[in-house]
Amino acid sequence: MTIAVPSSQPQGPSLQPVGWLRYLSFSLDHKVIGLQYLVAGFLFYFVGGALAGVIRTELISPMADLVPRDTYNEVLTLHGTIMIFLWIVPVVNGAFGNYLIPFYVGARDMAFPRLNAVAFWLIPPGGLLLISSYFLTGAAQSGWTAYPPLSITTPAAGQVLWIVSVLLLGGSSIFGAINFIATILKLRRPGLGMMQLPMYCWAMLGTSLLVLLSTPVLAGTLIMLSFDIVAHTGFFNPGEGGNVVVYQHLFWFYSHPAVYIMVLPVFGLVSEILPVHSRKPLFGYSTMVYSIMAIVFLGLIVWAHHMFTSGTPPWMRLFFTIATAFIAVPTGIKFFNWLATLWGGKIALNSAMLFSCAFIVHFVFGGITGVALAQVPFDVHVHDTYFVVGHFHYIVYGGSVFVIFSAIYHWYPKFTGRLLNEPLGRLHFLLTFLGFNLCFAPQHWLGLNGMPRRVAEYDPQFTLVNQLSSVGALLMALSTLPFLWNVIASLWQGARAGDNPWNARTPEWLTSSPPPVENWHGEAPLVLEPYGYGVPIDQLDLSTASGRDLWSGGR
Amino acid sequence: MTLTLSDSESQALHGGSGEAEAHGHPDVRLFGLAAFLVADAMTFAGFFAAYLTFRAVNPLPEGATYELELALPTINTVLLLVSSATFHRANAALRQGRSELCRTWLAVTAGLGLAFLVSQMVEYFSLPFGLTDNLLASTFYLLTGFHGLHVTLGAIMILIVWWQVRQPAGRVDASNPFAIEAAELYWHFVDGIWVVLFLILYLL
Ligand code: HEM
Ligand SMILES: [Cu+2]
């Protein structure tokens, strides 16, 4: 069968604009698209972070004196929505997935480059629509969960714009997922088996399955919600005989898996970073793979642990408690594998490692409070209090955001050919680490003692602890300064990195930095053992050696 | 499921030149479409779940009606099932290089799809309830409307393929059947969803 395209036909990314302009264009190059996701994600992160600043400033004192309550609700809703749909999800999936996956499978681009670009270009309109709603009509006020009947009774225009933008962003992540699945399953270069892929591929495969199975349900649900608002149907409107609990089921059928959509890719990234900087093979590769798939499956069946206070019947509570507790098993396996990877390694405590190791600590803490929350009696006590806010920020910030930073320290040399400045990186880490823990650890105490979430005013007895938390937020805000300075100044002044500054084994390091348009100068290398540490790289025969030999080789 | 490619497959995928042409490979594109249909099916699944829950736990208000006649939807079911068969004929004709016959079958298929849409309109106007009358009514229109949208898109796809198959400079032929394969896969999917919808909405 011939599939060659006539050479007269313009083909592939080579006809795209070059230089920095291509980052503003409809590029088809997966590396450009990946960096587009990354930079766009950071722009939204700063907006979301500024909004967090507004929230924390408001909460310095018990009364609602900085912004009126309605504005507070808008700010809160925008903050949550931006952080989830425009920052974590696009960055840990879209940015790193697009940049790395084609390298990892030995392809020259993603399976569907055009769809890939479309997926990215859905994000700016989605984000701008969301943010502009604040100025045009007033933003949505019902939180990122948009629970009815609140979302039906608060001003309609902002809520509808919110729905439209979330639908755009959901479409973007579905297109992305289709692309990842097709690329990983269908575009591997000949001779490369599934069990020889770097772990991030497996993580992205699992994540994409979750996106494919759960995001459409959210889309359908939001379409129903918009009918309730615009056409006055009564799906979720109790006043019309509708059923709010159905909304919650459908919503959490997406949004519980969504937490894995935000952390599974992060698990994958950590699995790439730890072996490199501790010079050890990733411990327990196959158990890591099975754990990912177990997490995907269990993640799909535990959604109702968010609904213990919604009048769920006892058998349901029991089922969802037990199923949730089970997730601790594969997650625990992954943690012990990471620790075993570090164990006895030659650990370089550089910025990338500091952020990744902090992730392990934070995620264990957030995971434990999560298992606690899955216990009905405890959840009934702290539901919708600041305990929950503390818990999930340990997961999304202490987990995902820390790893995003770690990944940037790790892959920046590949993106740009330059190294980031280490002392600045450590200062960034120190400020973030202190600020983060000071901000969110006290919130567990607030919640246990009864401070509800999503309020602009609180009981004066909580003042001091809220102030501590706000100081932590201030430190986090400060921490972005050395980071920003570092990434911008290093573009010009950073030390030249060379192609493979970490002496890493995964395929993206076996090409130049930054890589050429079609990824490799000649034939793509066949890397059968991406974690083959223990042998000097120049003695590594990448095309013929079997993985096992490399493992035992130098150790 | 085997996850590794056979030698011939990877040969086809990566080509002799080792260039990026693989992306256009029809096999990969059909796979992508199938993945999209999984997502599409999940959207329907969410709607079905909502509908079934409403039926199970939310009683209709006093005096509200939700009664469905079986005659028209049964005809509609037949229309769609037949159209799946005619689409299959069209594809087979193309494989034999008989593109005029293929176009005829495609036209018949699109005609059956349009007949389905007309008949659904007739049904809508004969129903004793409207979109906002009660929960079940709303979900009924939501589901059938969403499905009707799919039929409309499918019919448009068929017409595009019909246009592309035309002789002599046909863009779609026995050696390049991707467009018709994709449209057929999509059309069977839409029919399959209708069967489930018919079972749940009308027969259950
Ligand atoms: C920059 C540091 C951050 C600070 C200081 C911060 C602070 C806060 C505060 C004070 C709230 C209000 C909690 C409530 O009243 O319920 C909140 C809510 C929330 N935050 Fe953050 N946050 C930060 C970063 C993030 C990140 C990275 C995410 C990523 C997913 C995130 C996701 C959310 C969500 C989903 C909500 C709930 C919004 C809602 O209830 O609708 N936050 N945050
Ligand atoms: Cu959950």
Image (spheres, rainbow, N blue to C red):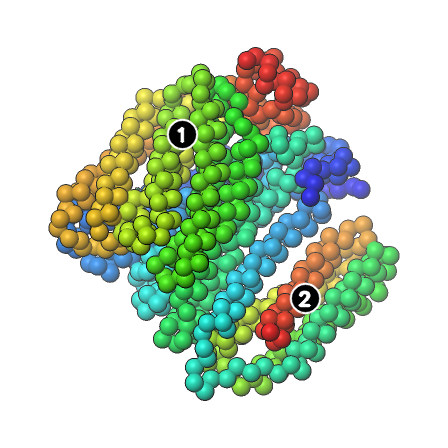
Q: In the rendered image of this protein, does residue A548 appear above or below residue A54? A: above
The label shown at residue B191 is: 2
Q: Residue at position x 32%, y 21% from top?
A: A423
Task: Say what secondary structure mark 2 lies in.
Answer: helix
Q: Residue at position x 21%, y 59% from top?
A: A69
Label 2 to label 1, Cα distance in Å? 49 Å
Q: Is residue B190 left or right of residue A235?
A: right
Dividing the picture into quadrants, the one containing residue A489 is top left
The label shown at residue A356 is: 1
The label shown at residue A17 is: none
Q: Chain of mark 1?
A: A
Foreground of the two, A293 or A415: A293
Dividing the picture into quadrants, the one containing residue A183 is top right
Q: Is residue A260 left or right of residue B99?
A: left
Q: In the image, what residue type sits under mark 1?
A: Ser
Q: Residue at position x 63%, y 21% from top?
A: A548
Task: Say what secondary structure mark 1 lies in.
Answer: helix
Foreground of the two, A129 or B188: B188
Dividing the picture into quadrants, the one containing residue B118 is bottom right
Q: In the image, what residue type sits under mark 2?
A: Asp
Q: In the rendered image of this protein, does residue A205 appear above or below residue A489? A: below
